Amino acid sequence: MAEYHGLSQIFTTTEASLYNNLFKSQNPPFHSPTALILEISPNPFPHTTTTTTNFVPIIKNNYNFNTLETLDHELESYRSKIIGHDDVYVAGHVLVYPSYNGFFEKPGLFLDQMFVRKCYRGMKFGKLLFSTVAMQAEKMGMGMVDWLVADWNEETINFYEKMGAHYIPDYRLCKLYGDQLQAFGKKSDYEPRIYRE
């Protein structure tokens, strides 16, 4: 995804940092950073009705993936590492975390990343991932889902507008990271004052 957005030069995520930030949390899914993995298989998935979290996986068995090797030339690189699931492959993911905006009465989810691998685009997997996030936000009584989209990504902007998303052109995303974050955090020309009554 970093390559897709031209951000490889700032990419510092490791397998260990993903594990520590996403999978070691004591908070339940959607109350802390949560990754949903889009998995595919040439064999039907069993329907799951019980779960230890407040999220029940969505199972769609109406795709024909009998020719996965022809469709996906990187198939082996994306094989699931879960024991007993040798025929399951990762096709995409979505990363969300709780958010709050002072303009809205209720909290929401911030959709940080949604990515479907190139060979699986056009199969409505992006819509499946996004609707899963929206359904979960609604189920939890949240008031919104926020996300960013690159202004050059017209196809994705059109997708979001068709589903009813509001585009806010007058705002820009700002980030302070890396050396600039450390340098600004160390500036001593600003002394915060704490007032007590």
Image (cartoon, helix red, strand yellow):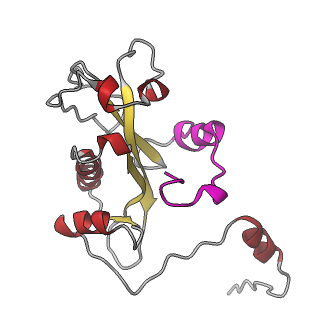
In depth, the one of 155 and 149 nearer the eye is: 155
In depth, the one of 151 and 172 nearer the eye is: 151
Q: Which residues are magenta?
A: 1-26
Confirm whether the magenta stretch covers residue 25.
yes
Q: Position of residue 85 (x, y in %)?
A: 38, 16
Q: Position of residue 70 (x, y in %)?
A: 31, 27
Left/right placement of residue 69 relative to residue 99 reads left
* Residue 101 visible in the displayed image: yes
* Residue 144 visible in the displayed image: no
- Give the quadrant of residue 21: top right
Q: Residue furthest left?
A: 62
* Point 21% across, 47% down: residue: 124
- Placement of 188 over or under 27, stated as above or below: below
Left/right placement of residue 182 relative to residue 71 reads right
- Placement of 104 over or under 49, stated as above or below: below
Total residue callouts: 0
Q: Position of residue 66 (x, y in %)?
A: 23, 21
- Placement of 39 over or under 195, stated as above or below: above
Q: Say which quadrant the C terminus sits in.
A: bottom right
Q: Position of residue 48 (x, y in %)?
A: 24, 25
Confirm whether the magenta stretch covers residue 69.
no
* Point 70% across, 84% down: residue: 196
- Give the quadrant of residue 111: bottom left
In depth, the one of 38 and 98 nearer the eye is: 38
Left/right placement of residue 1 relative to residue 58 reads right
* Point 64% across, 41% down: residue: 14
* Point 83% across, 74% down: residue: 186
Q: Residue furthest right?
A: 188
- Give the quadrant of residue 195: bottom right
